[in-house]
Amino acid sequence: MRSLLTKSLLILLLLVNTAYAAADPLPSWNDTIAKKAIITFVDEVTKAGSPHFVPPAERVATFDNDGTLWSEQPLYFPEIFVLDRFKAIASQHPEWQKNPELKAVLDGDLKSVPLDLDVYARAGYTTTEFEQSVKDWATTARHPKTGKLYTEMVYQPMRELLDYLRANGFKTYIVSGGCIDFMRPWTEKAYGIPPEQVVGSSVKMQMEIRDGKPVLVYLPEINFIDDGPGKVIGIEQNIGRRPIMAFGNSDGDLQMLQWTTAGSGPRFALLVHHTDAQREWAYDRTSAIGRLDKALDEAQAKGWTVVDMKKDWKIIYVFQKK
Amino acid sequence: MRSLLTKSLLILLLLVNTAYAAADPLPSWNDTIAKKAIITFVDEVTKAGSPHFVPPAERVATFDNDGTLWSEQPLYFPEIFVLDRFKAIASQHPEWQKNPELKAVLDGDLKSVPLDLDVYARAGYTTTEFEQSVKDWATTARHPKTGKLYTEMVYQPMRELLDYLRANGFKTYIVSGGCIDFMRPWTEKAYGIPPEQVVGSSVKMQMEIRDGKPVLVYLPEINFIDDGPGKVIGIEQNIGRRPIMAFGNSDGDLQMLQWTTAGSGPRFALLVHHTDAQREWAYDRTSAIGRLDKALDEAQAKGWTVVDMKKDWKIIYVFQKK
C-alpha cells in the first residue's frame, strides 16, 4: 500500500509543479525590478536545499490594507463606510443632533469628522448587527470616482501576489489600521484571507444576554489602534511570529517593515508607491491620506523594494482583468 | 493531464481514508459515552452529504489550557512559572525588597501572591528575553508531585483528541486565562498548536529601539484578561469565527461554552471533570483552583458532554503512553 501511496503522491506533486512552472504567477506585473525581487526572494526561501530555506510554518507575510491592497482616495475606505453607516443609523439617534461635532458630520461637513466617529456608529450594537451592515455596504456602496464597488478596487497585481505567496506555502495576513470588524466580512472573498488572519484596530466590547442568548455588544471605547508601532504589537499579539515579508504603502507601515527586516535570516520589505495619477492617484510625501515620506527615505537607504505603480503594474484593479 | 491528476488524487484520498478508518483515533479513551459523543459529532459535521456538514474553514475548536489540556494543581502552572521567574530575577531588582507584598512572595509566603506578580516579573524586559525564560523553564522545571516536566503532564487523551480533530479538518485553538506569551513557546511541540492559534491573557507592550534594533518591551500594565466572558471576546478578536466545538473544565470556561453552543447548526461543548484523586486530582464545586460549579450545572441541564477522568480515560499523561 505504501508504494502505491508514494507513487500517487509523486505523480500528483509532479503535475502540480509542472502546472505552476508553466504559468507566470504574476501576469499583471511588468518584468521590472520589483517583480524580479519578489520572485527571487520566494524562490530562495522555498527551494529545498537553498541556504536561505524557511520552513512553511515560518513563512508569514503581512500586508497593510488601505493603499496597499486597495485604493484609499479620496478618503480611507473604512472612513467612507463609517460615514455611510453613521448617516444610515442617525434617525435612530436623535441625541446626535444635540452634539455640535456629530451634527456637523450629519450636515455634510467632512472637514470636522471626529476621530471616534466609528465608536459612535457602533456603541450599543451587537457584533452580528455590525457585521451585517458591513456586508450590506460591501455589496452595494459604490466609489464616487469609479462607480465600482469598493471591493472591486482591489489591486489585481497584489491579488496575484497573495495567491502566489500562498501557493508557495506562505500564510498571508492583513495588518491594517482599519477596524478588524470592518475587514473580516469580505477579506476572504476579496483576498482569499480568512477572518482569523486579519489584524486591525478594534473597539472594546462586552458579552451580554439579549433575548436569552449571549451576544457581544460594542462599548463606546477604542480598544486598540493598529497603526505605526501598533502594527508591530498587533503582529506580536495576534500572530506571535515575526513576518519574513511585509508590504505597505505609507509611514504608518514603517515600523512593521522595520520589525520584519530586523529579524535574522532572509527578510523582504516592499512599499507600494502611488505614482499613477491617470489610472489611480499620485501622492506621497505631503498627502494627508497615506503619507509616504519617512518610509520612502528608509526604503531607499535600506534597499527595500518600492513598487512604482505606473511602471510596474500592467493593470491596477481586479475589475480591469480580462 | 487532468484525468491522470484526478486519478492520482482519488487513489491518494482512498488510501488515506482507509488508513484512518482502520485505527482507533482515541486509543486512550475508554469506550464510554464521552468518546462516542465526540466521534458521532465529528462524523456528522465532516461526512460529505451529512445534513450537519460543516465546511472545513468553519471547523473551529477551542480548548481551555489549564485543567483541560494539562494539570493545574497544586497551583495553576502559569503561576508556578511566574513565581519561579520572579525569584530568578529578584537579584536584579533590589527595589522589590522594599515592597512588603513582593518581599512576602520572595520570603515564600504563597498565600499573599499579588495578582499582578506577572506584570512585575516582566515590566521592562523584551519579548525575546521573556520567551527565552519560558523556553528554559519548560525544558527544566519539574512538578513538585510527579517530578516530571510540566509539559509532560499534558493529558494523553486530549492530545489524541487534538490530533483527531485536525485530521478531520479542524483548526484547533487554545483559549486560556494563562498569558499568551507564556504558552506560545511550547504549545506547538506539546499540542501541535502553532503560536498564531493561541489566545490568552496579555500584558501591554511598546516598541523601542535598543542597540539600534527595534524590540518589544513589556509595560507594567495588564492588557487583557482572557477568562470568563473575556474568553468570548478573545475568540472574537483573535479568531473572528464562532467555534463549533469548545472544551473546558471550570466556571471560567462557561461563557465560551455558552457562546459556542448558542451558534446555529451543530455545536459541541465538553467539560473535563477532575474525578481521579489517585491518578490526578479530584476537585470541583469548592476548589479555589479550577472551580467547576455553575458550568457543571449548566452542562447537566443542557446535555453537554462531561468527561469523568477516572472512568473515561485509560491513562492520564503523555508520559504514561507506552
Image (tube, coloured by chain):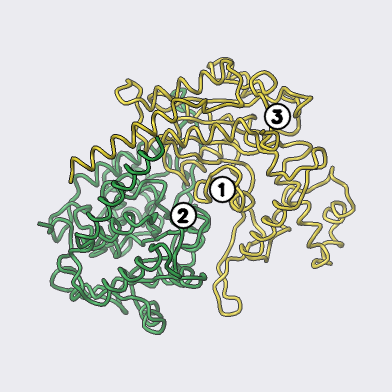
Chain colours: A green, B yellow
Above or below, comparing residue B199 to residue B244 in the picture? below
Q: Nearer the viewer, residue A318 or B105?
A: A318
Question: Farthest bottom residue?
Answer: A301
Q: Is residue B67 left or right of residue A168?
A: right
SS category of the residue bearing label 3: loop
**Residue pointed to by mark 2:** A57
Q: Which mark is residue A272?
A: none
Q: Quadrant of residue B10?
A: top left
Are discs 2 and 1 less than 8 Å apart at CB?
yes
Residues under labels 2 and 1: Cα distance? 11 Å
Q: Quadrant of residue A65?
A: bottom left
**Residue A79 percent location from the top left of the image:** 31, 57
Q: Looking at numbered disc 2 in the image, what kind of residue is underneath it?
A: Ala
Mark 2 surroundings: few (<14), some (14-19) or many (≥20) residues within 10 A: few
SS category of the residue bearing label 1: helix
**Residue pointed to by mark 3:** B291
**Residue pointed to by mark 1:** B188
Above or below, comparing residue A126 to residue A304 in the picture? above
Q: Nearer the viewer, residue B99 or B274?
A: B274
Question: Is residue A109 among what the camera can see?
Answer: no
Question: Is residue A122 among what the camera can see?
Answer: yes
Above or below, comparing residue B87 to residue A86 in the picture? below
SS category of the residue bearing label 2: helix
Q: Chain of mark 3?
A: B
Are discs 3 and 1 less than 8 Å apart at CB?
no
Q: Residue placed at 47% from the left, 46% from the top?
A: B237
Residues under labels 3 and 2: Cα distance? 36 Å
